[in-house]
Image (cartoon, rainbow, N blue to C red):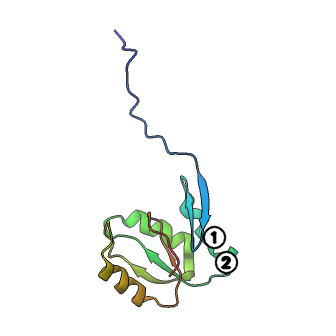
């Protein structure tokens, strides 16, 4: 007998959105990584630092594909609740490259 309290197991993504608040911009949505090049073009940025963890090579590949030759540095040391020392090392690694990552941390250096 079917239950009318069945719970859907399908994952539903929130609606896509973009939010700009200085000094950053967040673009969220399924496939948003494909918009990275356009986002950089709008700001006339030609060099990028790709931040993508080694434990998700597929995500890193999508980011590199989206950014192409703009990727001047790939940073794979990713942690939740980034400690200040790690953020400083990443910032010092690419002093002139805007940072763009397909993960939750997408920022300009």
Return the x and y of residue 103 as percentages of the image width and height.
Answer: 44, 64
**Residues at marks 1 and 2 touching, judged by CB atoms closer than 8 Å:** yes
Give me the residue at 36% from left, 80% from top. 87
Q: Is residue 96 above or below residue 99?
A: below
- Identify residue for label 2: 43
- Mark 1 Cα shell of 10 Å, populated few (<14), some (14-19), many (≥20): some
Q: Is residue 12 above or below residue 20?
A: above
Return the x and y of residue 95 as percentages of the image width and height.
Answer: 47, 90
Q: Residue furthest top?
A: 1
Secondary structure found at label 1: helix
Q: Residue furthest front?
A: 22
Q: Is residue 37 above or below residue 97?
A: above
Within the image, what quadrant is residue 20 found in?
Answer: bottom right
Secondary structure found at label 2: loop
Give me the residue at 38% from left, 27% from top. 7
Q: Nearer the viewer, residue 63 or 28?
A: 28
Alpha carbon separation for disc pair 1 and 2: 7 Å
Within the image, what quadrant is residue 26 found in?
Answer: bottom right
Give me the residue at 36% from left, 85% from top. 88
Image quarter hosting the N terminus: top left
Left or right: where does residue 69 sit relative to residue 43? left
**Residue 87, disc:** none
Q: Nearer the viewer, residue 92 or 61?
A: 92
- Mark 2 Cα shell of 10 Å, populated few (<14), some (14-19), many (≥20): few
- Identify residue for label 1: 39
């Amino acid at each position: 007998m079917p239950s009318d309290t069945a719970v859907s197991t399908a994952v539903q993504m929130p609606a896509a959105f973009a939010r700009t608040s200085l000094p950053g911009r967040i673009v969220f949505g399924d496939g948003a990584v494909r918009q990275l090049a356009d986002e950089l073009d709008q700001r006339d940025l030609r060099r990028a630092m790709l931040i993508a963890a080694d434990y998700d090579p597929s995500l890193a590949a999508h980011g590199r594909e989206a950014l192409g030759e703009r990727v001047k540095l790939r940073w794979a040391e990713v942690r939740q609740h980034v400690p200040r020392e790690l953020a400083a090392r990443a910032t010092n690694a690419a002093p002139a490259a805007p940072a763009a990552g397909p993960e939750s941390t997408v920022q300009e250096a």
